[in-house]
Image (spheres, rainbow, N blue to C red):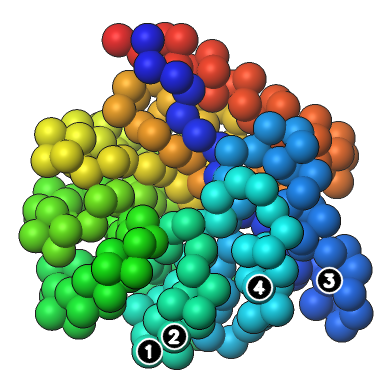
Amino acid sequence: MRAAPRLGVNIDHVATVRNARGGTLPDPVRAALVAIEAGADGITAHLREDRRHIRDVDMERLKAEISKPLNFEMAATDEMLAIALRIKPHAICLVPEKREERTTEGGLDVVAGEAHLRPYIAKLNDAGMRVSLFIAADPAAIDAAHRLKAPVVEFHSGSWCDALTEGNTKHAEVEYQRIAAGVAQAAALGIEPHIGHGLDYATAEIVSALPQVAELNIGHYLIGESIFIGLPEAIRRMKTAMAAGRARAQ
Ligand code: PXP
């Protein structure tokens, strides 16, 4: 059996709480260090154009202070490319970004955006960063990611998780099957499949049973859980759920 997927802990919302008061606490870098101590395999942070949570200095400190891989989520813009090339995180996840959205609402439109994305991916690949594209589990998008030579895709699990929360089991099943098929298609093309957005213990366990899934990136739920049980315990429970799911992989 393959090892359980890696857990990338997204610490954006520690910065959201910090920024609500405008000071320095709680410190997202401290959260990253605590997360790693508790078993996180990497740290994910999204430097948004409007700097609503993570700031440039947070990214610099994360790169300097953490001992596990840093996954830098960013929009494909010249400003972000320059910052990424300066900080040189382990990995980049290219995401779509709209100022008015509350969170990353959909996947990258890699089919329509292929020409725009190509030079960004090439420059990041050439600089030695592992590039991931945050996409819907759509066959045409996966083929475009392959043409773009992205070594990793991260499938947006938000619609599946929302359908489950709303009790819409029919829609949830359709969304889950799309993700499962996307994971198989990506793996067959030699692309490493990751999954993220909206995951909790139960959904992380389910997708961990897909044997080719190499990494889950989880933020909002873990930071929410940490209010009640602490971040280390939330991470331990998440890792336990992921290991239980992987143990069922066929
Ligand atoms: N992966 C990507 C690419 C994201 O944009 C986000 C949200 O910032 C996540 C994972 C984590 O989603 P959540 O906070 O809902 O766990």
Looking at the image, residue 27 sits to the left or right of residue 63; the answer is right
Q: Three-letter amino acid code at disc 4?
A: Glu
User: Would residue 206 be visible to someone looking at this image?
Assistant: no
Q: Is residue 143 above or below residue 15?
A: above
The crowd level at tag 1 (other Cα within 10 Å; few <14, some 14-19, many 20+) is few
- Cα separation, mark 4 vs mark 2, equals 13 Å
Q: Which residue is mark 2?
A: 82
Q: Three-letter amino acid code at disc 3?
A: Arg
Horizontal and vertical percent position of residue 54: 66, 73
Q: Three-letter amino acid code at disc 1?
A: Asp
Residue occupying the point 87% across, 64% down = 26
Tags 1 and 2 in contact by the CB under 8 Å rule?
A: yes
- Cα separation, mark 3 vs mark 2, equals 26 Å
Q: Earlier in the sequence, mark 4 or mark 1?
A: 4
Residue occupying the point 73% across, 59% down = 65
Image quadrant containing the C terminus: top left
Q: Secondary structure under badge 3?
A: helix
User: Nearer the observer, disc 4 or disc 1?
Assistant: 4
User: Nearer the observer, disc 1 or disc 2?
Assistant: 2
Count of labels in the image: 4
Q: Secondary structure under badge 4?
A: helix
Q: Earlier in the sequence, mark 4 or mark 3?
A: 3
Q: Is residue 169 above or below residue 79?
A: above
Q: Nearer the viewer, residue 86 or 95?
A: 86
Residue occupying the point 61% across, 51% down = 43
Residue occupying the point 38% across, 43% down = 194
Q: Which mark is residue 60?
A: 4
Q: Which mark is residue 78?
A: 1
Q: Secondary structure under badge 2?
A: helix
Looking at the image, residue 20 sits to the left or right of residue 212; the answer is right
- Cα separation, mark 4 vs mark 3, equals 17 Å
Q: Which residue is mark 3?
A: 18
